[in-house]
Structures are given as C-alpha cells and as structure tokens.
Amino acid sequence: MSPSRRSWARPTGLAPVAGLAIGLYVAFLLYPIASSLLTSFTDRNPLRADSAFVGLANYGQLFTDSRLLASLRFTIVVVIVVTIVSNVVGLGFAMLLNRPAVGYRLMRTLIFIPQVLSGVIVAFIWRSILTQNGLLNSFLRNIGLSDQPISWIGTPDLALLSVCVVVSWATIAFATVVYVAALQSVPGELYEAARIDGANAVGRFRFVTLPMIAPGMTISIVLCLITTFKLYDVIAVLTGGGPANTTQTTAFYLITVAFTTNRFGYASAIAMLLLVATTVIAYSLTGLLRRREADL
Amino acid sequence: MIRARLRPRGAGQFLFAVFATLLFVLPVYIALASAFKSQAQILSSPLGLPAPPTLDNLTTALERSDHLVTAGVANSLVITVLSVGILIPLSSAVSFWLSQQRPRIKTLLLAVFALGLMVPPQTVLLPIVQLLRAIGLNNSYPGLILSNVGGGYLSFAVFVYVGFLRTVPRDLIEAARIDGASDVRVWWQIVLPLVRPATATVGIFLALWVWNDFLNPLFILGPRQGQTITTGIYVSLGTYSTDYGQLFGIMFLAAAIPVVGYLLTQREFIRGLMAGASR
C-alpha cells in the first residue's frame, strides 16, 4: 500500500470542523457545568466585587431551605402524577386509535398537536380556560352548574391539580405517538397464536401486547419523567409559581434564586442538585425498566 | 357471521374514539375558534363556532404598536433558520468524523456528548449568560444562536447522525476515498445525500425546539432586546391579560408556522420521533 493511500484511511480533512463543534460544546455545555460546580462552593453574588470560598455551606443550606424542599415535594408529585397519567392515557389512546382507517389516522394527527405547541402557548390556552374569570368558569355559569367562580389556579390544591392536567395534556400527546409506533411493531400473528391458544382480551394484552411494547414503554416513561422534572415554561405562564409559592418546581425556583435574588453560589448548588437528580433518575430508571422488559 | 359480530363493535369503538379525541383536543379547538371571535362571544359561548367569524383579532395583533407578532415571528425565523442551518452541517460533519475514529475515541466522545441530552437547561443557563457577557455577546442574537449551536441540541443531532451512519455501508465511503476524493468532498457528495432521512429528523426537531424555546431566549436576549415570538407573548402580555380575543389572535399567528410545519412533515415527524426517542 502506498503511503499516500494509507493517509486516506483516516479522514483528517474534517478534523477542523470536528474541532470547532467540540470546542463549541466545551464552551456552552461542559464549561458551564464545571463553572456551576465551582461556583457552588462560593458565595458569589454579582452585586459584590469578590466572592469567598465557602466549602459545602451552599449544599448544607439545601437541607434547611423550606422553599427548596417545598419545590422538591411539588416537583416529585407532579412528575409522578404526570408520568402515570400520560402513560396510562397515552397507551389507552394508542390502543384505541391503532387502526389503519383514514379516520383513525386523522385522529392520531390531531392528538399530537399539543406536543407541537410551545409550553408557553399551551399554558396561555389553559390559563385562559382556568383563570378566575376564564372560559371554564363562564361555561359553568352559562350552563347553570356553578354561580360561584372556582379558583382553579388560585388555591394551592386546585393549582396543583391544574398544573398536573396541563402538563399531562402535552405529554399524553407524546406518549400516544410512542405507543402507537410500539403497537405497530407487534406482529399480528402473535395475536392470532394467542387467540388459538384460547387467550382472552386481557390475556392477549398481558402476554402479547405488554411484553412487545415494553421498550417503547421504557422510552415513554423516561422521557415523560425527564421533561417534567425540568418543567419551567408552563409554571412561569400558568401560575407564576403561586399561589404563595406552592407551585414552584425546583427548576423554576433555581431560576428565581439565580436571576431574581442573584445568589449565584447557592443557585449553582441547586443547579448541581438538579443535574445529579436528573442523571441518576434517568439512568437508574432506564436500567430498572430494561430489566423489567426482560421479565415480561 | 364474523362481520356481523365485528361491525357494531367497530362502529362503537369508532364513535368512542372520535368522542375521546375531540374531548382531548378541545383546548386546541377553543384556541382556534376564539382567534376568530369577539371578546363577548368568547365569554358567552366558549365552545360555540365563531358566528359571525371576525378577523379583528388577527388584524389588531398584526398592527400592534410594539410589533410583537411581526417582529417576533421575524426574530424567531432568523434565530431558528441560522441555528438549524449551522447545526446540520456541523453535526453531520462531526458525526461522520466520529464514525471514522478508533472505537475507543468514538465511545469516549459519544459518552461526553450523551451528557448534553441529560443536562437540564436551567443548570447551565447562568454560566452561559456570564460567558456571553464576558465575550460581549450577551443580549444578542449571535449569542443566542451560538449557545443553541454548542449546547444540548448538538448532542441530539450527533446521536441521530451517528446512529444513522451505522446503517450506511462502509464500502460506499471507502470506494469514494480510493477514487481520491477528499474527506470534505466525501462528506458533501456522498455522506450528506445518504443521511438525508437523519437530516430530516434533525432539522424538524431542532427547528421545533428552537422555535418553541422559552428559557434561553428569555434570559439570553433579555428584556430590552427584541424577543422571539415564544417569549414575546409572555413578555408583552404578561400572565394577567384578560383580553382573550387579542391573546388568542396572537397565539394563532404564533402557532401557525409550527402547526402547519407539523401537518406538512407528519410522516418524517413521527419517524423522527421514534428514531430520536429510541436513544
């Protein structure tokens, strides 16, 4: 082999482009993570000229900050409710709509639309519906069901419910599409075989559908969980974190600490908490669900 | 006999499916119908059809003195086209380069890129704003585009391309090499046409995400800089607006481009969702 031909074996012409991409990635992803980590050990505040190393003090504060703990509780409740609701309803929709006819295809098209709209628009639509003098209350009054307007996003319990409904609405759309694709990958012969073996509808679901769609289920659950965990835009528009800070997600609280109260050091500690939690949840849940896939 | 047994059930299922679907997309219908109703109509019959339909909401939205819709859509278009327009060649080239590297280097770099899929945008926002301020690009479109290009979007694009490149026969690329084509030419003339389905996925999803992004434009562009349409609605209207006709008119115009884009590219969209989701 001639020397010149050997040099073709490893492409180098694209190395500068690759270097540029990796450089940008370092600057806008890896460096920010490292910077957050370092800042989390300081009491940095843009209003003061210099900052001091404070060790783990910011991390210690995580355990005593009642607003942070409340935001964690709220986030976990929303994440669990949304993940369960959107996967159950999404699978239900997928099984209902998984037919070849044009009408069903049209319905599948419609159901995905909430996922195409931005979180801001989704939240504004629902805010117009749910707010005190909004469309739902005026509808209830028009049909004579309720004279007293209900404060759907103004009282803590109802606001929690409203956030769950709105976020689920968008993630159901996503889960439905994932489950439709998963169902379409199940070979029809399997159902025939199960039918011949005398399996009823429940049996066919349990022993054919469920094992075959398990990989799709893993994807849907993990992605619902991750996206809901870093929920920000719906909260900002729908409730603004209220009433009385009861609907703040941790991601929302982090932004408030960083950009409203300017406590960069402490905000960075929350940022690290969010990063570690997301990563741990995503990896452990993926592992857990993959193992379950094998058992089904 | 079988048909006789199936038909009523089929019809029943179809009716139930229609009912459930309509109930689910009711908020979309309300938003769509309200864009063409007067404020009084919206409140007196939230579920009714616009009778008579009015274009007042849309014309008022387009003629606002703050140019929220016209300027916002233009800003969003520029930011989306430039971000995606840079990301596609950049990520396809780096993916092609990666797929030619020794397995160990490839695995290591892919693991590093995987981080970008995971990191919550809130975690890196503050350092990015500070970095942009240090290089004088804070509150600017180039700053927002740069941070779009270098962040998690790049990771997503790289994973789609690298996954797709695994299915491309090596012989095709090797043959072009033997013919003496440079890497840049192989990438441009052989790889890019071959990975077109991956490019469709990357283009569609990144365009949607960049267009719909709220957090980054809100803080990177800042209040004084012209906003994108997504953040502009929030910044200009606030959350306490009760002028529903105006609100729905603006939202109709803001959502028109992504929704029409989705309806036109539906097939690629769903395929891409599965390709992207299986990673």
Image (cartoon, rainbow, N blue to C red):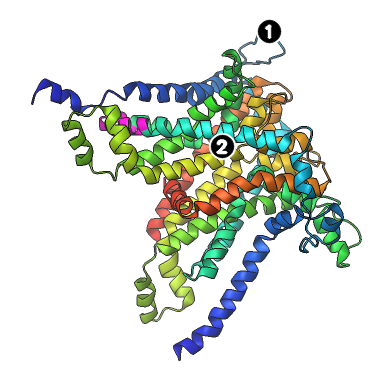
Q: Amino acid at mark 2?
A: Val
> Does residue A143 sit above or below B205 in this rendering?
below
For disc 2, the chain is B
Residue bearing mark 2: B210
Please tell me the numbered disc located at residue A49: 1
> Few, some or many C-alpha atoms within 10 Å of disc 1 (few <14, some 14-19, many ≥20)?
few
Picture residue at 66% right of the left edge, 8% below the top: A50
Placement of B170 over or under A210, stated as above or below: above
**Mark 1 falls on what kind of element?**
loop
In the visual, does A50 lie left or right of A88? Answer: right
Left or right: where does residue B90 sit relative to residue A5?
right
**Above or below A138: residue A275:** above
Q: Residue furthest right?
A: A147
The Cα–Cα distance between marks 1 and 2, rounded to whole angstroms, is 35 Å
Tell me the quarter of the picture where residue B47 sits: bottom right
* Marks 1/2 same chain: no
Near-viewer residue (B200 or B36) = B36
Q: Position of residue A26 (x, y in %)?
A: 46, 22
Q: Does B96 appear in magenta?
A: yes
Q: Residue furthest left?
A: A1
Q: Is residue A277 left or right of residue B231?
A: left
Q: Is residue A127 above or below residue A105?
A: above
Which chain is disc 1 placed on?
Answer: A
Residue closer to the observer: A218 or A112: A112
Which is in the foreground here, disc 1 or disc 2?
2
Residue B163 position, x and y percent, is 35, 42
Name the amino acid, label 1: Ala
Kindly state the secondary structure of the residue where label 2 is placed.
helix
The magenta span reads: B93-107
